[in-house]
Amino acid sequence: MRLFLDTSVLLAACGSASGASREVFRRASTNSWVLIATPYGLEEVFRNLPDLAPSASAEWAALRPALLIMDDVLTLDRPVVFPVTKDRPVLFSALAWADILLTLDENDFGGLMDKPFYGLLVFRPGVFLQRERAAGRLK
């Protein structure tokens, strides 16, 4: 399964060792999940890391190698009504490269949560983990 991690998830994983975002990283290899990000998201991480605890930079250095970095996708060949311009590259890249978009950004992605966007599912990390556990797929 290919999981696209939004910047909010990447930062949450850096900022907390006990949250669902970090748990996704911990369980990725055991569950054969491919964790995907793009340069757009990485740039946001670099810009926001200084706002977190000093240990977050070290956590980022440890987590970063687990990510498969794919190209940003800036346009789509289908109609889209998504008003948040700054997050279009996240949505379009996730649609191009992944099965599921994991995000904590309910302000921008709340309208897409728990329903498909051209086949792409959008979940909070905790909801995704609960879903996998309920389906008996979580190792």
Image (cartoon, rainbow, N blue to C red):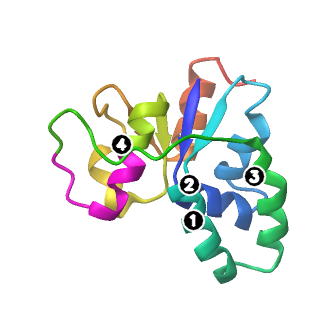
Q: Position of residue 84 (x, y in %)?
A: 26, 61
Q: Nearer the viewer, mark 3 or mark 2?
A: 2
Callout 2: SS: helix
Q: Earlier in the sequence, mark 1 or mark 4?
A: 1
Q: CA distance from mark 1 to mark 3?
A: 13 Å
Instruction: Characterize the local packing of mark 4: few (<14), some (14-19) or many (20 or more) Cα atoms within 10 angstroms.
Output: some
Residue at which label 1 appears? 43
Q: Which mark is residue 64?
A: 3
Left or right: residue 31 compared with residue 40: right
Question: For the magenta stretch, what is the residue range?
Answer: 81-91
Q: Position of residue 12 (x, y in %)?
A: 64, 62
Q: Which mark is residue 100?
A: none
Q: Quadrant location of the N terminus?
A: top right
- Magenta stretch secondary structure, dominant: helix
Mark 1 and mark 4 residues within 8 Å of each other at the beta carbon: no
| Dot 2 amino acid type | Pro
Q: CA distance from mark 1 to mark 4?
A: 17 Å
**Residue at position x 84%, y 55% in the image:** 62
Instruction: Characterize the local packing of mark 1: few (<14), some (14-19) or many (20 or more) Cα atoms within 10 angstroms.
Output: few
**Residue at position x 76%, y 61% in the image:** 60
Locate residue 86: give its quadrant: bottom left
Q: Which mark is residue 92?
A: 4
Q: Earlier in the sequence, mark 3 or mark 4?
A: 3
**Residue at position x 64%, y 82% in the image:** 51
Q: Is residue 79 above or below residue 109?
A: above
| Dot 1 amino acid type | Glu
Q: Is residue 3 above or below residue 103?
A: above
Q: Which mark is residue 39?
A: 2
